[in-house]
Amino acid sequence: MKIAIVSGASSGIGRELVKIIDKHCPMIDEIWVIARRKERLEQLQFKTGHPLRILAMDLSKEESLIRLKKLMDQKKPHIYVLAASAGFGKYGQNISQTFQDATGMIDVNVRALTGLTQMSLPYMVKGGRILLLSSSAAFVPQPGFSIYAATKAYVLSYGRSLGQEMKKRGVHVTTVCPGPVKTEFFDHCGTGETLSAFKLFFMAQPEKVARQAWRDTMKKKSLSVYGISMKSFRILSKAVPHRWLIKGMGLVL
């Protein structure tokens, strides 16, 4: 069985990647779509030509990872594309965040992404692609968004290292680092109006970010950054001391 796997497939960048994979991967038999909201995944079937295997689960839960691994080991699929797109973030000072939110970001952005990727590696085909969704928040420490930024820095480091490891197997890894994207993420992260000006200036459409990520992974780029502003921000993050950037962003240490 030839497949693609997309987590976070019910909305945002993940949903757009499902459509792109459906269009550009005629060789696969089906797409495994993973998200918590089953009805959203079922609606997605009407927008794709390939059959979708609906996997309504929360990968931050241990039992979901175990269930998915059992399915994978049973089917022994040939994976052409893996897109680990699920993400979760909460804005606020650490002292004011709940324990559930603080650890939840690590569970979704680190544990779930790593678990999904690790269980998929033995089944990746030569010439296959892995897309790991990080963020431009990975480039600079961000007080007020510190746990989220730290989890995305993990994804960036993990993706770059994994890409080197998988070269000998002919599998290419692209880490995707967008800036703010017009998705449901900001409806749930608790920013309120705090980042309104920033969002208005830099906000990107998810379909554009997804298309850029696909083009970049097809070109075997290890990093995909959408837009001139975020590419410039990445250069600044390497050239300017982080403490200056943090102050310039208006964040409080």
Image (cartoon, rainbow, N blue to C red):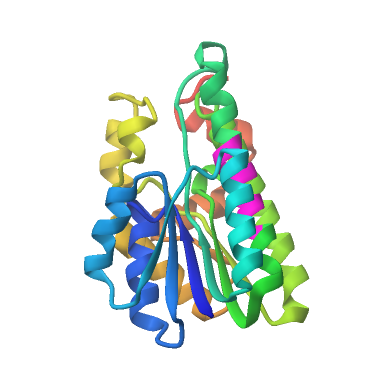
Residue farthest toward the front in the current orientation of the protein: 74
| Residue 63 horizontal/vertical position (percent) | 60, 41
Can residue 142 be seen at all in this image of the molecule?
Answer: no
Q: Nearer the viewer, residue 202 or 239?
A: 202
Residue 33 in the image, given as x and y percentages of width and height: 42, 60
Using the image, determine if residue 92 lies above or below residue 54: above
| Residue at image point 32% right, 64% down | 208
Is residue 71 among the parts visible in the rendering? yes
Relative to 143, is 200 on the left or the right? left
Q: Residue at x 50, y 48 (%)?
A: 136
Left or right, residue 59 beside residue 47: right
Q: Residue at x 62, y 31 (%)?
A: 243
Q: Position of residue 248 (x, y in %)?
A: 48, 32
Secondary structure mainly formed by the magenta segment:
helix
Residue located 28% across and 57% down the image: 42
In which quadrant of the rendered image does the N terminus lie? bottom right
Q: Which residues are magenta?
A: 107-117
